[in-house]
Image: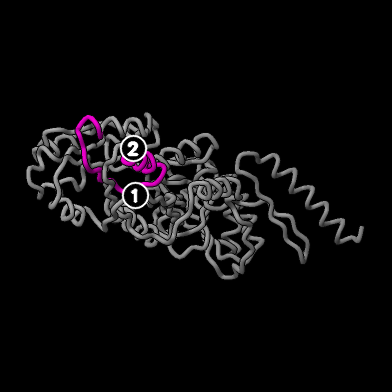
Amino acid sequence: MKVLIFAGTTEGRELLEFCEKNGIDASACVATQYGKELMEGNEHIISGRKDEEEIISLLQTEDFRLVVDATHPYASAVTRNVRKACARTNVRYIRLLRDAETAEDAVYFRDIRQAAEYLSGTEGNILCAIGAKEVEQLCVLAEYQKRVIPRILPAGESIEKCRRLGFENVIAKKGPFSVEENEADLKRYRCSYLVTKESGSAGGFGEKAEAAKKTGVRLLVIERPAEKNGISKKEVETILTECKEAKGYFPLFADIRGKKAVVVGGGEVASRRVKTLCRFAFEIVVVSRSFSKEMTELAKRGRILAKQKEFEAEDIEGAFLVVAATSDRELNQKIGEAAKRQGIFASIADCAEECSFYFPAIAETENLTAGIVGSGKNHGEVKEAAQKVRECLYDYKSGQ
């Protein structure tokens, strides 16, 4: 199962590292180039801000089946887009929530505008540790250029924004920061106020609160948006592990009477697949430029419908399952992609990774049927197991 982590936070980076360590197929999506650099050169990084439609395209193109939203607690617009995109594409969505923290003697505000109104009637310098996204909200303060000291990530766009707004002192460095580092910044700029978000332990909230207390600085906290549906990082890691260990192919026994099965290919492998399908009540269509002797006989008897032609995506419309068994790798891949677009089960004879179902070896008696599948990589093992199951069924029928 492919996993996509919407990151940009400490937890996002740690989750990607967890996946790499445990052999889980995962990629991370970050909003900025700087965010990509913070992931320490990992190859499975997708960068760039994406709206709802772009997220949908990404999920469908890369076939992600699980999304972990580990974006910042204040990135509510991103979370909304990710959640909607997952709902529209039927992709499982998990929201990671940071543990909340509170600080004694802090003043809490619903947003930065409300904090700016409070500060408008005060004096003294302000260390603003909310990032660059909303720092312009403090430009309403008198002499904000001198009073407000933004502390931002050392990303080019953030630094340029602060310069453009006219801030005389800007701290550009990566957090989270220790108590001592926070104290040093507060003392260096003779700050009377520290404005921060309730970013949890991963965002260094406790260290900022402790530094403010030690230096006698008034702590102003922007409340995080209320979220109810989410789980901890530890719980996310448990789910990721369960997904890795879960079997990806379910042995589906369904009523297929009258349902259409399409086999593309006319050679030896395709013939074996068709012979197996003929033991069941499928309406079988075989598409190929040429047919084996066995296929030709089946077509004459009316058991299959043979279409001697080049494959087209329209050939599988309305099918319950498709088998791609040609000798052309690119054509098999094309068939699998067409089946995926149409939501059809597909077995790709020369590539297990592209299958949405594995073609089983069959063991049966008059009233019992067993299907044996493997990982798609050890056909000999499946063949041997199928023979043993046939022997067991024979012994059962004989009463042995």
Residue type highlighted by circle 2: Lys
Q: Nearer the viewer, residue 321 or 188?
A: 188
Mark 1: secondary structure: loop
Farthest residue to the right: give it: 400
With 20 as the anchor, is 103 left or right in this view? left
What residue is drawn where x is 36% and y is 60%? Answer: 226
Q: Which residue appears at 31% of the width and 56% of the height?
A: 81
Circle 2 Cα neighbour tier, 10 Å, few/some/many (<14 / 14–19 / ≥20): few
Q: Where is residue 367, by image quadrant?
A: bottom right
Residue nearest the observer in this picture, 189 or 347: 189
Residue 227 lies, in percent from the top left, at 38, 59
Residue 324 x/y as whole percent: 51, 49
- Inspect the magenta stretch and tell me whether residue 187 lies in it: yes
Instruction: Assign the C terminus to one quadrant of the image.
Output: bottom right
In the picture of the structure, the residue carrying the numbered disc 2 is 214
What residue is shown with label 1?
Answer: 198
The answer, for residue 125, to whether it is visible in the render is yes
Q: Earlier in the sequence, mark 2 or mark 1?
A: 1
Residue 326 x, y percent position in the rendering: 50, 44
- Residue appearing at x 44%, y 45% in the figure: 333
In whole angstroms, how far apart are the C-alphas of marks 2 and 1? 19 Å
Question: Residue 154 occupies which quadrant of the picture?
Answer: top left
In the image: residue 128, left or right of residue 105: left
Give the magenta part as a residue range.
Answer: 186-213
Mark 2 in CB contact with mark 1 (< 8 angstroms) = no
